[in-house]
Every structure is written in structure tokens, then in C-alpha cells.
Image (spheres, grey):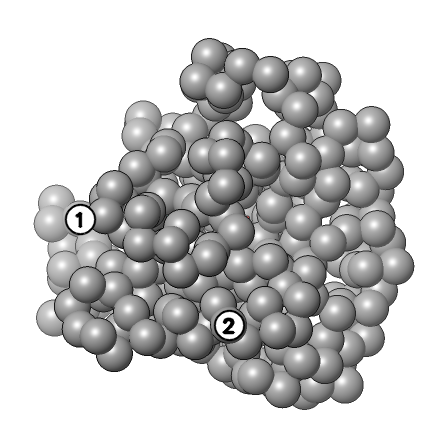
Amino acid sequence: DVLSRRGPPERPQRAQFPAQAQAELSREALCVSLRAGRIKPYFQPILSARTLQPVGAEVLARLSLPEGGMLEAGAFIPLAEQSGLIMDLTRVLSERLIELEPQLRPLGLEFLALNLSAANIEGKGATAMVKHLVDAFAGSSRIMIELTETAVLPNLQQMRALTTQLRLGGASLAIDDFGIGYSSIRALAELPYDALKIDLSFVAEMFDSEKSANLIASMLHMAHSLNLQVVAEGVETEAQRDRLIEMGADGLQGYLFGRPVPIEQFAPQARDLFPK
Ligand code: C2E
Ligand code: CA
Ligand code: CA
Ligand code: CA
């Protein structure tokens, strides 16, 4: 069952607690990790489809385990969202980015993209935090906020308030995971987005059927008709890259070009591969 699969086998007593106890324990661990500075930003390049040069980077959260190793975002972001820690986590990341600004500036990236879950951020705090980040990067890169819409905040009114505030604070906005979650076409048309990210599941399936490819083509067409830039994520093969360029994607992101890595690896990589 779920509990015994999750819990370490050498501590079977844990399985006797209800699921909530397990979640409590994990929240505590996440809290400690936040305070101990074990949440780290990793960087993945986003390339211009026209020049195949990196024009930006997405910041992805990682959690370094005290016993060694790194947790990917999927392993702790949902918990952070559910347990009310996502704002703290985002703030920690944002502060770390500001510390790294002197190392990021020489890379000459047009933009730096940070993820925000729309459902779990208190409007005011988030706006102030983003504005602070925008100001700190005024001399280097534009701050792009990748917003994921979720079921908790489907209210267009609230989304409009949030997106407008973020824009007024100087950030650009991308709608993340378009087409798989709760993002609606209406939201796309009515909210002040600058870019749309095609979810990697569409890219993964693009050669499976004509339908899948048509779906991407349709998203590109719709986004462009609304004056949005389109970034395709999860590009893993040259065939995907070439087809997406042919179809008119503006930006490309994926393991083909680079995995998310810490600043120590990202900075030299960006400098060597793509000299300015
Ligand atoms: P996302 O924003 O859609 O990010 C893309 C995910 O796809 C990342 O996973 C990235 O490592 C992965 N990826 C990139 N290129 C490829 C590829 O070519 N193939 C495959 N299979 N995967 C690729 P990651 O880092 O585990 O993040 C998972 C999700 O967690 C993110 O999805 C995002 O929704 C969320 N997340 C990550 N960092 C943060 C954060 O700081 N704040 C918030 N609120 N959410 C975050
Ligand atoms: Ca994202
Ligand atoms: Ca995405
Ligand atoms: Ca995603």
C-alpha cells in the first residue's frame, strides 16, 4: 500500500500512523530544509528558436538532502503548496537569486523565469517579492513569472488582479503548462500574459499522431494571434527541435539543450557554449 511504499522499510512503525502524520512529518522536514538553506535554485537554458542561442533561463527549485543527493521539484513542490509553505519557499529562492545576480549578470540573459503557483500565493506578498526581484535585476535580466493556474484559484477576477499587479511591478508573465491544467482560453485572452509555455507532454507526443502535432500547431497559432511568445518545453530530440522550429515556436527548452543545473555549472556552460 501507499504508506509502506513511501516509508523506509527499516522503520515500519511509521506505517502505523495515519497518512496525516506522514504529511506532518514531511512538512516539518520541509520547514527545516527551508530554514537550513537547503532549497536551491537550478537553472535550465531557454533558447531562441531562431538563433539557437540561450536567451533566458528557468529557475527550478531543488532540495538538497542532508544525507546527500537532491530532490527534484516534483518531490516537494506539491507538499509546499498543500502545506502553506510555497510562499516561504519562493521567497527563499528569490533571495538566493538576488545573491547570485553578480554571477548571472555577465551571462547577458534577456530573462530569468521563476515559477509561481497562482493558487497559493497571497497577492500582496507575492507582488512585493516580485517587484524586489525585478528591481535587483534591473541592470541584468527581465524577470519572467511562470504562472500555473490551478483549481483553487480559477476566479478570473482574482487572476486579473494578481497578473496586473505583477505586470505593474515590472515582471513579464508566462502561462505555464498551457493545455493540461486549469488554464482556459478565456484567461489567455483576457489576462496580460506575454508568453505561453507548451507543456512537455504535448512535445513528447508530437510524433505519435497527426492529431498531436496539430494540437501544437493550433496552440502556436492561437498564441501568436494573441501576440504571445511561445516556448516549447521538454525538447529532447533533434527531430522535435526541428519540427518545433518549422512550426514557428519562439523559444525552446529541454534536455537536448541542457538540464537544470546549479549556478556553478550553469554559468560556465552558458559562457562556453554561447559566447557573446
Ligand atoms: P514546470 O514549470 O513545467 O518545469 C518543467 C519541468 O520539466 C522541470 O521539472 C524540468 O526539470 C523538467 N524538464 C525540463 N526539460 C525536460 C525534458 O527535456 N524532458 C523532461 N522529461 N523533463 C524536462 P522539475 O524541476 O522537477 O519541476 C517540476 C515542476 O515543479 C515544475 O514544472 C513546476 O511546476 C514546479 N516547480 C519547480 N520549481 C518551482 C518553484 O520554485 N516554485 C513553484 N511554485 N513551482 C516550482
Ligand atoms: Ca515552469
Ligand atoms: Ca511547464
Ligand atoms: Ca509542469
Residue 83 in view, yes or no = no
217 vs 251: above or below: below
The residue identified by callout 2 is 221
Question: Whole-Å distance between the Cαs marked 2 and 1?
Answer: 49 Å
Query: Does the beta carbon at disc 2 come under 8 Å from ligand 3?
Result: no
Q: State which tag comes first along the sequence, 2 or 1.
A: 1
**Percent position of residue 68, x then y:** 31, 26
Report the amino acid beneath label 1: Pro
Residue 111's quadrant in the figure?
A: top right
| Residue at 52% over, 51% down | 250
Residue 268 in view, yes or no = yes
The residue identified by callout 1 is 8
Report the amino acid beneath label 2: His
Mark in the foreground, 2 or 1 = 2
**Percent position of residue 198, x then y:** 44, 63
Under tag 2, what secondary structure? helix
44 vs 218: above or below: above
Foreground: 111 or 23?
A: 111
| Residue at 14% over, 62% down | 4
Quadrant placement of the C terminus: top right
Position of 146 with respect to 72 (left or right) is: right
